[in-house]
Every structure is written in structure tokens, then in C-alpha cells.
Amino acid sequence: MMLRAPTRPAFSAIPTSTASRGQIQGRICRDSCPANTAPGITIRAQPAMSATRTRTRVSAGLKDKSSVATVISELRPMRTTRLLTAFLITLLVIAALVMSSCSDLNKELPVPVSGSQKVHEEGWTTASSANFHGEALRQTQYKLDECVSCHSKQYTGGVTGVSCMTSGCHVDANNVPKSPEACSTCHGSFSAPANNFSAAAPPRSVEGETDATSRGVGAHQKHLVTGTIGKATRCRECHTVPTQLNAAGHLGALPAEVAFNDTLARLTTAKGSFTTIPSYDASSLKCSNTFCHGSWKLRKATSTSQFAYADSVMVGENFSPTWTGGSSSATCGSCHGLPPKGHIVVPVSTCGTCHDGIVSSDGTITDKTRHVNGKINVFGQEYAF
């Protein structure tokens, strides 16, 4: 039995047609594409010599379509529809997750204490409460930014409509409105008028202390209140007084600095020939080398009362009192002797003979405005040191 090799399907090597040449060319143009008519270029298409049958998977709905182009044009809308459907499903899933999260948040909402809105804790305006706003501000070094954001820069209400003054809180003893930034709001007498700067001196330190043994209180009242030991001292004689609440160096956790700037403590004496350099030791709480406590000199040669001198120079005791020492820390005679060194010896009962109107026969200072005032008071006259 002889086996024959399969033979290829036979195709004509050259296509045949009974049509004329012009008819064939016209048919090619109509059934395929226009001929290239570029000048000088001739394109000759080679006739097909063979063909291979290939199977193509086509859906049932497209089997009757007449061309590949028709199939592709109908497949494209189907693909777009599927993409749009997937996008919409994804969007719905995301929306469902967001709604679920919102539902969880709503479960955590606080229960209102009353029918009105509340921002602060109970006791916010009660001085004895642990939630008192003064204590909260002290913990943050008196940063009032949050207060201003709700109550306005003038604290007159702002978006809350609640004024810090007219609410009956920040007012003086006469119910006169007083800014929360007034000096005596944080230290000194809270009920004092805003323009009474001496009332800003403790007792009542920024820590709320009132005892003179506390460094924040100490001898403030004896210095700033006229009638205690002498002429009232001004705040700026010992401290750098800020021009506004948030001035550099004002707020902070450290104790107030003692600078002795524009101060009686630095007074030059002996007709300009003796200068003292005052200082304060924050550890021992002692003042030293201050005119106020006896760092001064007087020279007989330039005095109008030379008869009172027992030496060419009269000097003070240059005493260094302790700030929290109380009344026992400095007494009459602590800052200048009785009498001063270089002064002729006389009994205290006769001090008023020359220093009339200043001191009585029992040694009591009768006119404290002219005691420790940077002047020499003799026979009713005042002279420069």
C-alpha cells in the first residue's frame, strides 16, 4: 500500500479575469484603497500566492456580522459599559464605608450638661475650684490666645457674646470694668482699679501666696505703700515693668528679675563722687549695696552743716536685708547708725532738733514721704546727697 503525501491546495499563480485592464483597476480602487498617484512613484502589489485558514473565537451574537470592523465597533461600547459599572460599584463601597465611620463618631458624642452650649468645665469661673480658669492660665504661663480667639482682643464678647468684664468677673470693687490684662489681675489686689499700679504689688503673688515669708510676697507692701517706712518705691525701681502683657521677659516660669534700673538704689552721693552698684541675690534673697539701705557717703567739705560732722566723711551702714525677713530684718538704725558713723554723738531724742518735721523725740518717723527719699532734710530744707 502506497502512502501519498498530502498536497497543498492549489492556487493559480496568476489571477485570471475576463475583465479589461481598466475595469480591474477600477474595481481594485473601489474595493480596497485609492491608488498612489504621487508623481514618479509606482507601487506594484504582489498577488497572493497562497492562504492559510485560521480559527477565530467569535461570540454567538457576532457570528452573523459581515466584517471585522463591525465586530470591533460593537465590542467597544460593551467594554466601556463594563468599566463604568466597575467604577460605580467601587464608589458605592467607599460611600458605605464613610457612612459607617460617621455612624461610629456619632456614638461618641458627649451628653450635654444643659440645654445651652458649654465650652469650659464646671467651676471655670469659681476661684476655689480646681478647674478655675486662673489656675489653667497659670499652668500655660498666662497665654491668653485662646481667650482672645473667642472673647475678642478687648475681651468684650467676640463670637461668644460673653464679655469678661460685664459678666461680673473682671471688675474692680466699684463694679467698674477691668481688663483681664490689668497688672493687679494676676498679682496684688484683684479688686483694685486698673490704674492703681501700687495695688499690683503682692500680697497675692502669681502663685496665690499671701504670706510675707514667701518670696513672691516678701516686703512688697513695705516698699510700695506710702506710710510704712518711707517714700513709696515705684515698681520700675526694682523691676523692668512691661509695656504690655506679652512683652519679652514678663511671662514665664522663673521668678521676677530684680534689675535696679531707674532706681533710688543707684543714687550717686557725696556730691557726685560716690557711686554704688546695687545687686540682688536670688538664692539668699538679699539686697546689697543699695542707697536705700545705707550705701551712701557725705563729705564735710561740701556740707552746709559741718558742725554735725565728727569726721571728714559721714557714711551709712550699707545693710543687706533679707527680702522675706519681715519687720525684724531691718529696724531703725539698721541702714544708718543712731547717729550715723562720722556724725557727732547725740541721743535719739534730739534727732528732731535738726531734722524737724521728720522724726519725733521718741524716734518715730513723722513724715515718711521725706524719709528714704534721696534727700538730706535739715532745718526744714532739702539738700542733694
Image: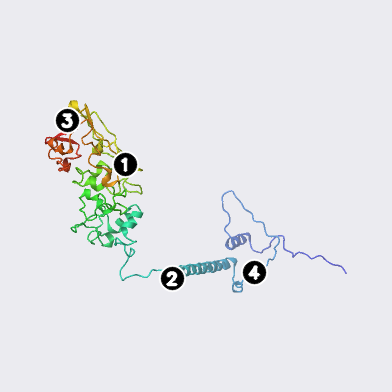
Disc number lying in front (4 or 3)? 3
Can residue 376 be seen here? The reply is: yes
Image position, residue 249 (x, y; %): 32, 45
Q: Which residue is mark 2?
A: 103
- In three-dimensional space, the C-alpha distance between marks 4 and 3, rounded to whole angstroms, equals 133 Å
**Left or right of residue 367, residue 211 in this image:** right
Front position in the image: 45 or 115: 115
Amino acid at the residue labelled 3: Ala
Amino acid type indicated by mark 4:
Arg
Task: State the SS at label 4.
Answer: loop
* Rendered position, 184 above or below 9: above
Q: Residue at x 42, y 70 (%)?
A: 107
Q: Is residue 243 visible?
A: no
| Residue named by callout 1 | 286
Q: Is residue 64 above or below residue 38?
A: below
Answer left or right for 149 relative to 367.
Answer: right
**Which label sits on residue 308?**
3
Of the numbered discs 1 and 2, the one sitting upstream in the chain is 2
* Disc 4 target residue: 57
Front of the two marks 1 and 3: 3
* Image-quadrant location for residue 33: bottom right
Task: Write the residue at 63% across / 59% down.
Answer: 21
Between disc 2 and disc 4, the foreground one is 2
Q: Element under label 2?
A: helix
